[in-house]
Amino acid sequence: MSMEGALKTRPATKVVSWCDQYSVGIASIDAEHQKLIGLINDLHAAMLEGQGKAVMGKILDGLAAYTVSHFANEEKLMRLHRYPGFERHKAEHDKLTEKVKVLQLNFREGTVIITVHVMTFLQSWLVGHIVGMDKQYAALLRAAGVK
Ligand SMILES: [Fe+2]
Ligand SMILES: [Fe+2]
């Protein structure tokens, strides 16, 4: 495929790009955050490509499921290392999970479609949480040797 063709079929589809400021300094957690960012970008790309409901729904289901498992991993680590901000952090996870599940349900029922507005919501939902809350546990977990 020519360069031109490659550019045509691969527009700038990223709604959020990983950058160093998002790092919590723990490789395993950064990798999970990168995976979440990847799923949000997949959804955005599918939206731009005008993919059908089945494809969009599948990505959204993947995002919701991975969110649940990522939050569970963080909660396990915070509990294990007696992070004092655990309760507040867990409450925030519960709120975010609820929001994604409502989106997933509404999408499935056809009352919501994936728009730029929804993508902006997901992007700020994730980045806001990483920068605003995940970074707060980072020093403690790093000191405890979590990698
Ligand atoms: Fe996180
Ligand atoms: Fe978190």
Image (spheres, rainbow, N blue to C red):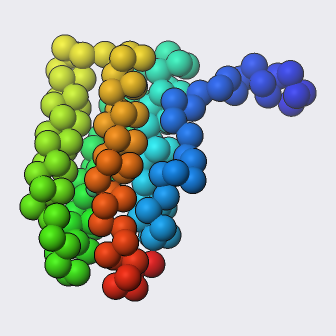
103 to 117, vertically: above or below: below
Q: In which quarter of the image is residue 134?
A: bottom left
Which of 134/126 is in front?
A: 134
Q: Residue at 38% x, 82% y: name it.
A: 143
Picture quarter containing residue 53? Answer: top left
Q: Is residue 111 left or right of residue 5?
A: left
Residue under the image location 22 percent in, 28 percent down: 103
**59 w.r.t. 136: above or below:** above
**x then y, percent, for residue 32:** 42, 59
Counting from the top left corner in percent of width and height, residue 45 is at 53, 27
In percent of the image, x 36 and y 50: which residue is there? 130
Q: In which quarter of the image is ligand 2?
A: bottom left
Q: Give percent across and percent down for residue 114.
A: 35, 19
Q: In which quarter of the image is the N terminus?
A: top right
The quadrant of the image that shows the C terminus is: bottom left
Q: Is residue 52 above or below residue 136?
A: above
Q: In this view of the protein, can residue 54 be seen by the observer?
A: no
**Which residue is the extreme one toward the bottom?**
145
Say left or right for 123 vs 64.
right
